[in-house]
Image (tube, grey):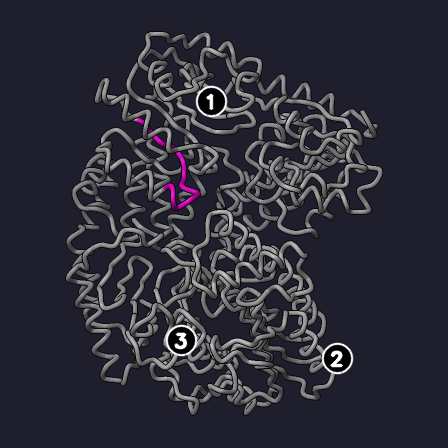
Amino acid sequence: MKQVKEALVLITIDTMRYDDKIFLLENDGGFIDFKNVFATGTSTPFVFPGIFASCYPAVYRPSVPKLAEVLKSNGYATFGHNGGNVYCSDVNGYDVGFDFFKDRFKQNTMTGLSTYIPSYNDILSDFFKWIDEVKSEKIFSWLHFMDLHGRWDHFKYLSEEYRRIALKVYQKKSKKLEFDSRELSDYKNLRAEVLKHLKVGISEIMDFVGKHAEKYILILTSDHGEELMEHGNIDHLPKLYDEILHVPFMIATNIEKLREQFKSVKNNLISLIDLPVTLVDTLGFEKPKEWQGLNFVKKKRDFIYAESFRQKNSPRHDPAMRGVRNYCVRTLEWKYMMLDTKETFFDLQKDPYELKPESVPEKIKNYVKEILKNELKNRLKVIVGNKLSNKKEFKKENEGNRGEGFLLSELKGENYGKVVEFFKKVAPKTDKDYVILSLAYYNLKKRNEAITALKRALTINPGNLDALFNLSQIYHEMRKWSKLYDVAKRYFEIDPNNWQINDMLCDVYAFEGHFEKAIEYLQRALNFAPKEILPEIGEKIHFLKSKEKEVENKPKLAFICAKGLDSFLDDIVKSLSSEYWVKKYRVNNSKEIYSAIDWADIIWFEWANEVAIIGTNYPKIVGKSVFVRLHSYELFTTYPVKINWNNVNKIIFVAPHIKEIFERSFPRILEKVNWEVVYNGIDLDNVSFEKKEKGYDIAWVAHINHKKNPEMIIQIIKKLTEVDERYKIHVAGDFQERRYELYLKHMVKRMRLERNVIFYGWIDDMEEWWKDKNYLLSTSVFESFGFAIIEAMARGIKPVIHSFYGAERLYPENLLFDTIDEAVQFIISGDYNSAEYRSFVERYSLKKQIKEIKKILKFKSGRGN
């Protein structure tokens, strides 16, 4: 394939949601991931005016100069392929400026889409053929993939089962039929499958620009997202909610100066209307006077504006823009929306999913009114480059009322309680407010409250360095290594020169056995640390180098798991590090899996999932000792049949009932591979025991989803309050399914239980949180082990456990309940014995678990039982 001097590639994936990007980010670490980019509308006709002509939809005309025209006039050869979407075709003038342009095939005039939509493979074929023929050394290419949007049933890369689902989805969407929960799940799985294949296409393009372009900029984004029942539909109707407006936006470039510039603004608020201006300005060309966006590298946006039009007698889009106009103004903190002639307001700090509309504050009304005045003055052009005087007054007034100077003086005077009391009276609103509040909580030794405040600050401003640094410090204190890495790395991407952040990242890598990486960060810290710290850092480098030399001759043991699934590993890693050179790998892609396998003598796959599938089918794993630990969810997937058990020495189950279900579901696998049951272990030396007694505070600890059966807690607490109103359920967990958030909070209000059910969100410091709890209620329909139950018992807290399948093998029968009435009786009865609970869980000690694991790691033969 020919070499080019400059390659500018724009990939737009129709209907790709912001949360879909995880599938593509796994593809390559070279992308800069922008967090707050929004479309100018809710469907293609309302967004491509911004992407190509830097115009809002209502003012776009085909005569407005396009990005391709500007680039062509400056010597670029241009390629365009729109994937069969008429709304970004020659019909609307988007072919202008392209040397090669392919679009509509056989168009369906009812939908605006082709009856045959080309797959990404078809488009790439045209693209690479054009590359081979083009003579210019500077190229601009636009590729619009429709794989997520329309008729998938003809895509050859999908299996027959996915094509069947695809046809059903298309028919139901076409006929406006409702999806049941299974069909919605199938649709999500179909989208995930398509994205996995798109990832392959992105890889090919990345490979091309990486090998054949001296300089390149690759941009990956979407024109809009897709609603998946968040607000009642499966579509992208003209409703301006974030699941449609918030789009993925990623840039890869080998131009170092540009990388640094893009990284410095990746957390800023950006509109797709800014893309053409930023590119043209970056390349040093003059932008057309009609363009309305701004250069997002040079100018920070205060708000985004988006608009769409609905047909007068239908919920569908009106591309002609003659129907009902919906629009919104959004900042990082709030959103104002005019939806079907009704004003709606969302406080995004409290309600990020836009489920609780509020009345519009007067200040916001005035602010939006000023924006709309400018829009009318400029024939519906929204002037985003100028800051409105109203907004300056709005900020100034609020800062004055909030008394920031007073609060800082109280912090310096160590009057932390006064700061907390102040914010109880005047709710914090800015990221600075939450940072100040977090410092007060931290110094009052309330780490959970401090963490919550810092997370709120980062919701408002993801680039707040104070919040990122302080949260990193807390996670470092708690030895939450994975969370520390995620937060400290975010700080590092903005400011790589903070010596303490480098030092903390060093500690993460040192714990995980990656000594060379740890030393690299520590040497970087040397360049920026104060003089008085340098000797200490030098000693630490010397220690790590000696540690690396010490482990060189030990067996190499790699723990491999997908990023975010390492929560059960840290105690094991720590306990085995004296006998092995242990490295923990949190992997994102097959390349990282292969690298871990290449390094190791012994491989432990944590979870029998996609990572184990890829790893066990890697040819170079043959001859190594390989172990796969299966926890729970894998039982209910097809992952086990895809794992190459011929390359596995043993499968490890965490409980007997898990092994039994596995054997019933996959009977032939255990004929191929040895197995062992090793219970999870709890580090009793680090779990404080306290003699407890009857009380009224009940803990419920879990991710809030269908497996945990949270509906039951409402029924139980209702019956308990009928006995005594002092009973309370304390829920420590994050909502993983929005339906449950809506349902539970609705029922709490309906049953008047606001004082009896407290939702805390996810809790990081459980040591602090457990202290005042008398019971642990578990309502799960299925558990492999139930770590929260074991931890509660170790602390002397009485567990009340719903008798899920296998529970009687894990816990005493007298702690299991079948009915709600039994659960209530267990709680109100006088039976309570903290010492007995602690004594029982000694069978699940970490020491016993490590002893069993050490035996298993010596196991060599893995064929048959």
Q: Is residue 746 above or below residue 30?
A: above
Q: Which amino acid type corresponds to the residue marked 2 in the rendered image?
A: Lys
| Viewer-nearest residue: 181 or 28 | 181
Q: Residue at x 58, y 28 (%)?
A: 571
The crowding category of the residue bearing disc 2, from other C-alpha atoms within 10 Å (few below 14, some 14 to 19, many at least 20), is few
Label 3 vs label 1, nearer the camera: 3
**SS label for mark 1:** helix
Q: Which amino acid type corresponds to the residue marked 3 in the rendered image?
A: Phe
Horizontal and vertical percent for residue 305?
Answer: 32, 70
The quarter of the picture where residue 22 lies is: bottom right
Q: Which residue is mark 1?
A: 789
Give whichever of discs 2 and 1 has the lower sequence position: 2
Label 2 vs label 3, nearer the camera: 3
- Distance from disc 3 to disc 1, alpha carbons, whole Å, reads 52 Å
Q: Which mark is residue 46?
A: 3
Horizontal and vertical percent for residue 593?
Answer: 70, 47
**Magenta span of residues:** 729-740
Q: Residue at x 50, y 36 (%)?
A: 480
Q: Which amino acid type corresponds to the residue marked 1 in the rendered image?
A: Ile
Number of numbered discs:
3
